[in-house]
Amino acid sequence: METAIATKRILFIDDELHVRQVVKACLEALGGWNVLLAASGQEGLVKAASEKPDAILLDVMMPEMDGLALLQQLKANPVTGSIPVVFLTARLSLTEPQRFHELGVQGAIAKPFNSLTLVPQIANALGWKVEIQY
C-alpha cells in the first residue's frame, strides 16, 4: 500500500547550510513532506541507513565525498540500495540526465531551482502524486 504523501520522508544532503534551509522549508511547506537533513556525504550515509527515508535528494558537488561517490556507496549497501535518489546540481548539461539515469538516479534538478516548482519536479522524478499546499 502506498504511503500517504504527507508522510513521505526525504533526506536532503547538501553541504551549503542556506540551501538546506531553503529546500527543507519549501518541501515541508509546499509538499507536506518530512525532510531530514545531512551536511556531508558521510553524515548522509549514516542517516540514510538509520532513517531509511522514502527518497534522497542529493547535491552532486560537495567536498570530501561528492554526490557520485555517495551514490555508489548508497547503491552498494543493501539497506540503502533501493532508496530512490534525485540529484540537485549546479552543473546540469544536456547529457548528464542520461548519464545519471544510467547510474540509477531517478532524476536531476538544476540549481538554481524555482522553489514553486521544486516539489512537482521531485514528485515527477519519483513517480509520486502531489498536491501543492499553497
Image: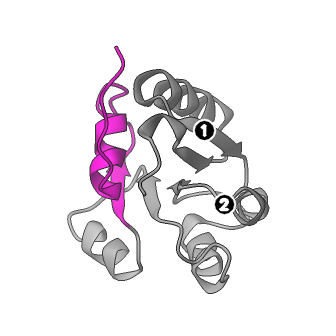
- Locate residue 49: give its quadrant: bottom right
Determine if the magenta segment contains residue 118. Answer: yes
Report the residue at 33% width, 49% height from top. 128
Specify the quadrant that holds the N terminus: bottom left
Question: Which residues are the magenta region?
Answer: 106-134
Report the residue at 61% width, 35% height from top. 20
- Locate residue 94: give its quadrant: bottom left
Q: Is residue 117 left or right of residue 64?
A: left
Q: Looking at the image, is 13 positioned above or below residue 97?
A: above
- Locate residue 104: give its quadrant: bottom left
- The residue that mark 2 highlights is 52
- The residue that mark 1 highlights is 35
CA gap, disc 2 and disc 1: 12 Å
- Label 2 is placed on what type of residue? Lys
Report the residue at 48% width, 32% height from top. 27
Q: Is residue 9 left or right of residue 96?
A: right
Determine if the magenta segment contains residue 49. Answer: no
Question: In front: mark 2 or mark 1?
Answer: 2
- Label 1 is placed on what type of residue? Val
Residue 82, x across and y down, in percent: 53, 74
Report the residue at 33% width, 60% height from top. 107
Residue 45, x across and y down, in percent: 73, 65
Q: Which tag, 2 or 1, sits closer to the chain's start?
A: 1
Q: Residues within 10 Å of mark 1 (few under 14, many from 20)?
A: many
